[in-house]
Image: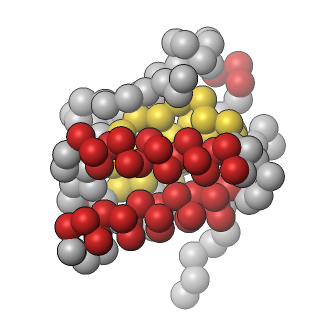
Amino acid sequence: MPRTARKKSKTGINHVIFRGINHVDIFLEKDDFEEYICRLKKISTKYELEIYAYCLMGNHIHLLIKEGIEDISISLKRLGTGYAQWYNIKRQGGRKTRGRQGGRFVCLSEMVSQKNCHLDSPHSNKPTQNVMK
């Protein structure tokens, strides 16, 4: 049975979460983080996404993101697929990430400012980055 379509945010802003399959690490080295951030910047520029904040941890990712010129699910699929292919070629491994994990709609009033924006996480992983510059 197919999963239901992602609900649309009225503001276009979403807190999106990606996680490794079985909580496996998807970032093992510094260049893994750098590659993901590079890809995130390219996708956000090309498809006019607004990245308010991101938090990359060893086995999962949080993005506070506003939809751009194409549907957010398509943009995020491009990002995830591209990174997974790069990762798998580098490591000669199998699939490391699961599909979308969830998220929530975000109102701009929830953010004090972009500089103070932080994605709260109940996870014990320490964030690598959290505010897009």
> Residue 90 appears in which quarter of the rendering?
bottom left
Q: Give residue 74's position: percent from left, percent from top.
A: 65, 64
- Number of labels in the image equals 0
**Nearer to the camera, 70 or 59:** 70
Q: Give residue 87's position: percent from left, percent from top.
A: 31, 63
**Nearer to the camera, 62 or 29:** 29
Residue 101 in sight here: yes
Residue at 21% over, 59% down: 24
* 54 relative to 67 in the view: left or right: left
Is 132 placed above or below 66 here? above
In the rendered image, the quadrant that contains the N terminus is bottom right
Residue at 47% over, 67% down: 81
Residue at 43% over, 27% down: 130
Is 105 placed above or below 53 here? below
> Residue 114 appears in which quarter of the rendering?
top right
Q: Give residue 88's position: percent from left, percent from top.
A: 29, 70
* 87 relative to 9 in the view: left or right: left
* 48 relative to 18 in the view: left or right: right
Residue 21 in sight here: no
Residue at 72% over, 51% down: 47
> Residue 52 appears in which quarter of the rendering?
top right
Kindly give the residue lying farthest to the bottom in the view shown.
1
**Nearer to the camera, 123 or 78:** 78
In the rendered image, the quadrant that contains the C terminus is top right
By what rule are the colours in the image chosen? secondary structure
Is 109 placed above or below 24 here? above
